[in-house]
Image (cartoon, grey):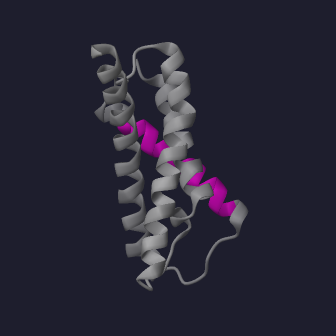
């Protein structure tokens, strides 16, 4: 039972970290959204979100240099599970924003949110001790 609790706590910690970083990134994009009226092409947006994910991963490594998950196979599973959950959470947040009539940004869509979370998770997977 203790192992199960530890396992859930580790996954929840990684998920919470990625979701909070994505949430702050989205809030920043909403704040900057009106300054940039022209939207970049999807290819440029993919490159930008990939770069943002790498930067967010590097910053998270500076703040939290150790992974909450110690088992290598669980860390590999986390590399895919957490970005799917974070992307789904951001997509749900985007749907709530759409219902309220608020302007959406690309991070409110699953694909862009998944890409951002995956590159952040990949940085943590490769470099966290």
Q: Left or right of 102: which side holds 42?
A: right
- The residue shown at (37%, 66%) is 27
Q: Left or right of 93: which side holds 40?
A: right
Q: Main secondary structure of the magenta part?
A: helix
Residue 110 location, x and y as percent? 58, 58
Q: Relative to 75, say whether 49 is above or below.
A: below
- The residue shown at (51%, 54%) is 88
> Which region shows up in magenta?
44-60
Q: Is residue 54 magenta?
A: yes
Q: Is residue 121 magenta?
A: no
- The residue shown at (36%, 37%) is 60
| One can see residue 35 in this view | no
Q: Relative to 125, say whether 96 is above or below.
A: below
| One can see residue 20 in this view | yes
Q: Left or right of 36: which side holds 13?
A: left
Q: Left or right of 23: which side holds 127?
A: right
Residue 81 location, x and y as percent? 53, 36
Q: Relative to 59, say whether 124 is above or below.
A: above
Q: Quadrant of the N terminus?
A: top left
Residue 91 location, x and y as percent? 51, 62
Q: Quadrant of the C terminus?
A: top left
């Amino acid at each position: 039972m203790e192992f199960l609790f530890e396992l859930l706590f580790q996954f929840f910690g990684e998920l919470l970290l990625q979701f909070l970083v994505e949430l702050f990134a989205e809030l920043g994009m909403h704040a900057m959204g009106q300054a940039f009226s022209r939207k970049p092409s999807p290819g440029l947006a993919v490159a930008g979100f990939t770069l943002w994910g790498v930067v967010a991963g590097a910053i998270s490594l500076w703040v939290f240099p150790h992974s909450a998950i110690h088992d290598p196979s669980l860390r590999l599973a986390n590399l895919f599970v957490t970005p799917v959950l974070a992307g789904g959470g951001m997509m749900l947040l985007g749907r709530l924003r759409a219902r309220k009539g608020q302007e959406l940004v690309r991070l409110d869509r699953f694909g862009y949110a998944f890409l951002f979370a995956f590159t952040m998770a990949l940085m943590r997977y490769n470099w966290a001790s």
